[in-house]
Amino acid sequence: APAVSLPTSESVLSLAEAGLSACGVDPAALFVPEAPGTVAARSPITGTVLGHLAAHGAEDVDRTIASAVEAFAAWRTVPAPVRGRLVQRWGQLLGEFKDDLAALVTVEAGKTPSEAAGEVQEMIDICELAVGQSRQLYGKTLPSERPGHRLMETWHPLGVVGIVTAFNFPVAPYAWNTALALVCGDPVVWKPSEATVLSALATTALLNRAAAEVGAPENLAQVLVGDRAVGELLVDDSRVALLSATGSVRMGREIGPRVAARFGRVLLELGGNNAAVVAPSADLDLTLRGAVFAAAGTAGQRCTTLRRLIVHESVADSLVERIVAAYGTLSIGSPTEDGVLVGPLIGEAAYAKMQSALEAAVAEGGAVLCGGGRVLESEAPDAFYVEPAVVRMPAQTPIVFEETFAPILYVMEYTDLEDAVAMNNAVSQGLSSAIFTSDLSEAEYFLAHSDTGIANVNIGTSGAEIGGAFGGNKETGGGRESGTDSWQAYMRQATNTINYSGELPLAQGVEFI
Ligand code: NAD
């Protein structure tokens, strides 16, 4: 695959500084001398450090949460449709500064401009949804068994929402949570990935500008800079009513029980190990495009990345041949260059994990059909660009059950659709899945039996829209964000019984005084 030239570290820094300034963050005031406890802002494009940022300590976290609790007291009294105006203004600002924020996502996460802009577009979309939702925070009214009584369900602001996010979607999952939390009456405290702090600061600057413009209380949206130790302070603080965390299964396994131990509410969006089943009747042109984008796009660093292709034996050879040929045309390199489709891995550890997964796959009987090698190594020794790999596996061996956060597509064959669906469901994660087929009954069978939170027909596993609830089952954590009824996670539900009868009949016919 053609590898194109890389920008200098200075030009990447300039891009970041321009994005920060446009969004209202002064880069000159941001970077501090390196010292113990500072966080390095890096770009995977060059692998170099852009600058160091001061991190927050325990006292800062305490103060931040205390001020969020104060903000809650004021914000919860503002009518929800009026709260919506803040989110509406934030969405407008995100539209105005879309390219600037997207540039920061490109710098920090290595996404192509098109994918980075798509991520910011998701933020704008969820703002629109949340503004509408601000007039629809509805409950049901239910008949009572007692005469002259009525039951109703009401929803109230919940409290401080702690948000922990992953590096690969630096800003959109924050917005999915924040746009809804704000209309629901909750302030947010955000611990972004330590790899993508600049994008977080720019996002928050735009939100705080919106808050100032609409006259919202201070401290509705705050950022905590730091690594997982800072995240743990949020996790363990009982003033944080909901902890919404996006990241690896490992992270969820650590924080889930800790939040549960203090009876807090947790919303987990964890790793995926997503499969697509390709039936004999599939349109192979469409399947090819769907599979290649889902598997190699974002350099395999999406939670919804296609990692397993389960292909009917009658079409496996021809489809695999075409995928390998398509992989050969993917341009790998700096996302700042025109035409590049595959950017860098986030760092060296991701590269090492990809290599050891490929070694394990071969040891378990797999054949690497293409990719896996590093490119641009001499130009940027600290950056990790790889050729996306396709590996033909004899079966779903142990390595296939793991989510390796890199572009490796494992291909397995099947004979009967029931077996293909069983293979789809055999992994411990349950985020996204797809079937490519022209047969209605196959499609419906798949949708009825695939155990993932997202299941698609004739599109790949990635690229969800915000209108539908996003999230997965099993070790993916069970959380749902963005559309449909996800707003309810950010509110406290109450059931109210109202007696207008003038009598006091007890439920279930119980007799007392
Ligand atoms: P990660 O788990 O290493 O880190 C995610 C975030 O959690 C970071 O902010 C990190 O500082 C924090 N963290 C880690 N351990 C913590 C702890 N014990 N207490 C508190 N905070 C802690 O994940 P990553 O490498 O940044 O992201 C990649 C992973 O995220 C993949 O597994 C991917 O599938 C998953 N992901 C899931 C979704 C989803 O919506 N389901 C979306 C994006 C990414």
Image (cartoon, rainbow, N blue to C red):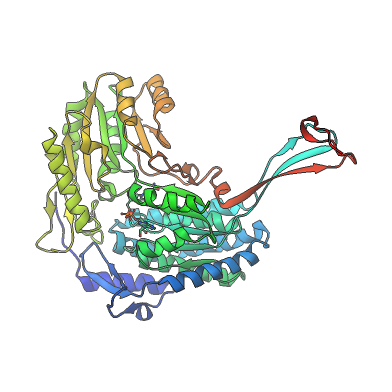
Q: Is residue 444 found left or right of 378 in the rendered image?
A: right
Task: Name the residue: 25% across, 27% down.
Answer: 311
Q: Is residue 456 visible in this depiction of the protein?
A: yes
Residue 394 in the image, given as x and y percentages of width and height:
17, 28
Q: Report which quarter residue 73 is drawn in.
A: bottom right
Q: Nearer the viewer, residue 508 or 316?
A: 508
User: Where is the C terminus found, in terms of image quarters?
Assistant: top right
Q: Residue furthest right?
A: 502
Q: Residue at x 45, y 42 (%)?
A: 478
Q: Locate residue 482 relative to residue 311 in the image: left or right.
A: right
Q: How many marks?
A: 0
Q: Residue at x 18, y 64 (%)?
A: 6
State whether residue 284 is above or below residue 21.
Answer: above
Give the image quarter of residue 289: top left
Res 8 quadrant in image: bottom left
Residue 176 seen in the figure:
no
**In the figure, 61 relative to 487: above or below?**
below
Q: Residue furthest left?
A: 378
Q: Is residue 439 above or below residue 405?
A: above
Answer with left or right where residue 116 lies relative to residue 414: right
Left or right, residue 315 beside residue 211: left
Q: x, y (%) of residue 328? A: 15, 43
Q: Position of residue 103 (x, y in %)?
A: 34, 64
Query: In the rendering, at what x and y percent does residue 425 appear?
Result: 34, 30
Q: Which residue is depicted at the point 58% across and 66% down?
A: 69
Front one among 332 and 446: 446
